[in-house]
Image (cartoon, rainbow, N blue to C red):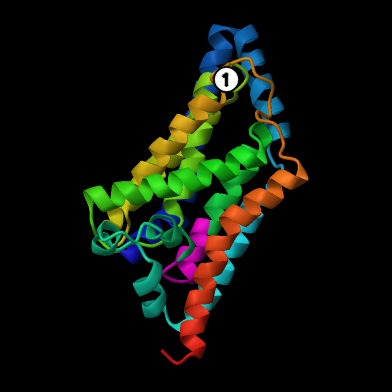
Amino acid sequence: QVLVVLGIVFLGLPLWRQGIEAAFEAWRSRRRLERDPARWRAFEASRIRFGTWVGARSYAAAVLIGAFALTYAVMVLVGPERAVDEFALVNEKVREGEWWRLLSCAFLHGGLVHLFFNSAAGWSLARIARSIASEAQILLAFFLSAVAGSVASTLLLGETSIGASGGILGWGGMLLGMALRHKELRPTGLASNIMRWVVVIALIGVAGMGFVDNAAHAGGFLAGLAMGLWFVRDEEVALPTGRPLPLPGWIAVGAVLGAPWLWMLWVMLSARFAGR
């Protein structure tokens, strides 16, 4: 299954994007040009203009990815089994009242490949999201989607699970929701690009059904979709949406969200150095 997933990512996806998808886009663009040249020019202008927006750096995403990497380093130091036992999404322990696992599991990863793919996908999506949403919205979408994905996994699968995929899929859902509703984003092609990305994620989920938490993916994506639709409930709101947080706001957010993460690291490290 791992080889199939790697084949989809490194062989199937490039062949699809550079071959089938490129040919289809060229054919569709020519059809638009033949039917309505004025509309084709407007459509292409929107896509080019949107291309100039994309690429903003998301500091929230950078901090999250750094937290994933540091948590993985601590996992390696203390032993993956101990970290999973304390903070992974374990159905029985969640039902016993260990609710922190719904979020703490998002910071754990099962290996460097898992960490790399989640970080790369998250960084790519966050760079697009930062062009149309505020940092606070990006951060909110990740945490709520991660929790929603964990809840879906607990209810539907009930298997031990780790990884930030629910939160990262939430960014994809958020982008799709905003692209579907906001009038400036509809003609950019963002919605169709996100849908193709969703198809790829679904194929990976099917190929890796034995180790991919599809319930968390779906739950996180749907939560992000709902937030994206909510963020642009006024389709004429100026982009990027949302007001930037002042420095005191970021300090408060960092204290509220950072303290549980630091506690998680402390628990793992203290157990390691105490010899337990």
**Residue 240, position in %: x, y?**
68, 29
Q: Is residue 18 visible?
A: no
Q: Is residue 122 left or right of residue 79?
A: right
- Segment tinted magenta in the rendering: 109-118
Q: Main secondary structure of the magenta part?
A: helix
What residue is shown with label 1? 182
Q: Quadrant of the N terminus?
A: bottom left
Amino acid found under the numbered disc labelled 1: His
Looking at the image, is 153 positioned above or below residue 42? below
Is residue 253 a member of the stretch shown in magenta?
Answer: no
Residue at the spot x=41%, y=74% of the render? 83
**Residue 35, position in %: x, y?**
53, 8
Looking at the image, is 156 positioned above or below residue 92? above
Q: Is residue 100 left or right of residue 126?
A: left
Is residue 115 a member of the stretch shown in magenta?
Answer: yes
Q: Quadrant of the C terminus?
A: bottom left
Splitting the image into 4 quarters, where does residue 161 fall? bottom left
- Please tell me which residue lies in front, 12 or 31: 12
Disc 1 crowd rating (10 Å Cα; few below 14, some 14-19, many 20+) is many
Q: Secondary structure at mark 1?
A: loop
